[in-house]
């Protein structure tokens, strides 16, 4: 029997990147991206920013906490546990400012690695797809560690197969 570790929202995001999840050019819409936006925005439009919707989708599917209004990147400052910048691990949520540190716009993704003066994020709506992209470290507003709201492993351990009465014929 294969002993595998629990999947995290970050791992689900890596699988979505490997599957090539991206916007469809022109008037067509990627149904998965539309579903992610619908789940967090109530609007099934792939033209809306979907970095927060991507994180919410991966959190939602696996029972992890998301903030209220998860489509807003800066709202992720209110989910999970605070992490010091030097303690960031792959899968931590990194919140960036966009256009202005004091403004409302932002970007959010999963910490992937540090680069020279940069942070590499696994995220949605990066070059119109799920990718790993580089951002200036100076844009970091905060880093949060995802918190599971539901323990799937414990729930699965409580499930017992139904007893069956099998007789030979």
Image (cartoon, grey):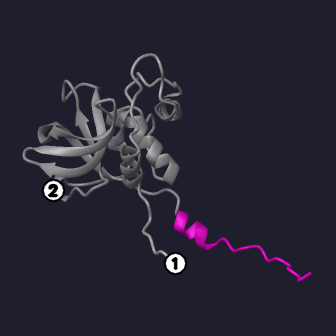
Q: 71 above or below 66?
A: above
Q: Main secondary structure of the magenta part?
A: loop
Residue closest to the far front? 169
Give the mark nearer the N terminus: 2 vs 1: 1
The dot on residue 84 is none
The residue at the far bottom in this view is 168
Q: Residue at x 63, y 72 (%)?
A: 158
Quadrant hosting residue 123: top left
Using residue 58 as the reference point, say whether residue 156 is left or right of it.
right
- Are discs 2 and 1 less than 8 Å apart at CB? no
Q: Which residue is mark 2?
A: 86
Determine which quarter of the picture holds residue 125. Answer: top left
Is 159 magenta? The answer is: yes
* Residue closest to the eye, 110 or 129: 129
Answer with the quarter of the image where residue 160 lies.
bottom right
Q: Position of residue 100 (x, y in %)?
A: 19, 25
For the point 77% across and 73% down, the residue is 162
All told, the count of numbered labels is 2
As drawn, 42 above or below 164:
above
Going 28% across and 26% down the picture, which residue do you hit? Answer: 105
Range shown magenta: 152-169
Report helix, strand or loop for mark 2. Answer: helix
């Amino acid at each position: 029997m294969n002993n595998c570790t629990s999947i995290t929202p970050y791992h689900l995001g890596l699988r979505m990147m490997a599957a090539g999840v991206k916007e469809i050019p022109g008037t067509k819409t990627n149904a998965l991206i539309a579903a992610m936006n619908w789940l967090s925005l109530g609007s099934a439009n792939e033209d809306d920013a979907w970095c927060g919707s991507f994180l919410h989708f991966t959190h939602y599917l696996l029972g992890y906490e998301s903030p209220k209004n998860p489509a807003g990147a800066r709202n992720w400052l209110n989910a999970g546990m605070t992490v010091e910048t030097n303690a960031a691990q792959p899968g931590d949520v990194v919140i960036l400012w966009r256009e202005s540190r004091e403004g409302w716009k932002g970007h959010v993704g999963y910490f992937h690695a540090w680069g020279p003066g940069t942070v590499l994020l696994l995220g949605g709506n990066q070059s119109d797809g799920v990718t790993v992209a580089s951002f200036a470290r100076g844009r970091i507003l905060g880093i949060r560690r995802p918190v599971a709201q539901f323990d799937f492993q414990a729930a699965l351990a409580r499930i017992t197969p139904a007893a069956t009465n099998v007789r030979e014929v």
